[in-house]
Image (cartoon, grey):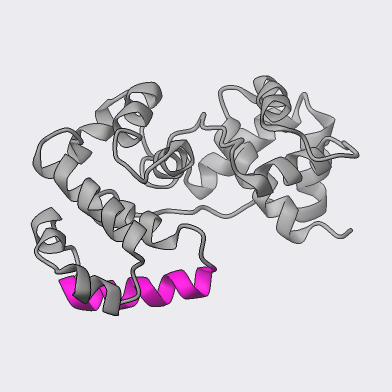
Amino acid sequence: MQNFGLGPEDIKAQLDKLAETDSNVKAAIELVGYPGERVNPQGLNTFVRVIMGQQLSVKAAASIWTRVQALVGEDADASAYAAQSDEALREAGVSRQKIKYLRSLCETIEDGVLDIAALPHMSNEEAIKAITSVKGLGVWSAHMYLMFSLGRTDIWPVGDLAVRVGIGRIVGLEERPTEKEAEKLGERWKPYRSVMALLSWHYYSNAPF
């Protein structure tokens, strides 16, 4: 299974390939340039950080993550998180709901239900199924892991609002596309939909309006 196909050179090459036959992609690149790479390490701590950051601002999520790391140590394993009391996690800023998600994550890893080391060897569909078996990790979380930790090149996270806004602007739609509409739009960019998601975020943040 191919992983790590989203380095800077890969991103440029894949977008250039799409731009050869898609004038919208070409125009978007000319306006905002190429998006940079985004890389997260593989492993438990990336999933924990995803859970900690749900429905929070980037700044607030980073603050909580720093306190959690101070509590369990860097590169902590599932047993280190499981050993923490609810009270200690609450003092670090973790909500009761997210503590439940964290407990579920640790249990699925310790029980062997989620084998993180096996994810790089799974197909996209298999990896998404494995990740979403954990309470608190949905399809969006799985897509983020596949893109930024495994570097998979054909992930299309239409559940992300900014992706839909960005792609709608790139193709010149007056209204933000629905998830179903964005899914259909993405068919034209296979097998390089991950770089189109990157371009959508980049365009959303940098294109003048």
Closer-to-camera residue (138/182)? 138
Q: Is residue 84 magenta?
A: no
The image position of residue 151, as x and y in percent, is: 42, 40
On screen, residue 46 above or below 112 = below
Is 67 a magenta residue?
yes
User: What residue is at 37 percent from the left and 43 percent from the top?
Assistant: 137
Magenta: main secondary structure equals helix
Q: Is residue 1 left or right of residue 144?
A: left
**Location of residue 130 in the rendering, given as x and y in whole percent from the top left corner:** 29, 30
Quarter of the image with the C terminus in it: bottom right
Q: Which residues are magenta?
A: 57-72
Seen at 28% across and 79% down, the residue is: 91
Q: Can residue 177 be spotted in the picture?
A: yes
Total marks in image: 0
Any part of residue 33 in sight: no
Q: Quadrant of residue 174?
A: top right
Does 52 sit left or right of 179 as displayed?
Answer: left
Above or below — where is 102 with respect to 147? below
Relative height, residue 47 to residue 167 (above, below):
below
Q: Residue at x 42, y 39 (%)?
A: 138
On-image quarter of the N terminus: top left
Task: Check the image and report above or below for 18 versus 65.
Answer: above
Q: At which x and y percent is residue 101?
A: 30, 51
The residue closer to the viewer here, 122 or 84, is 84
Q: Position of residue 183 (x, y in %)?
A: 65, 25
Choose between 127 and 3: the one closer to the eye: 127
The residue depicted at 27 percent of the width and 54 percent of the height is: 100
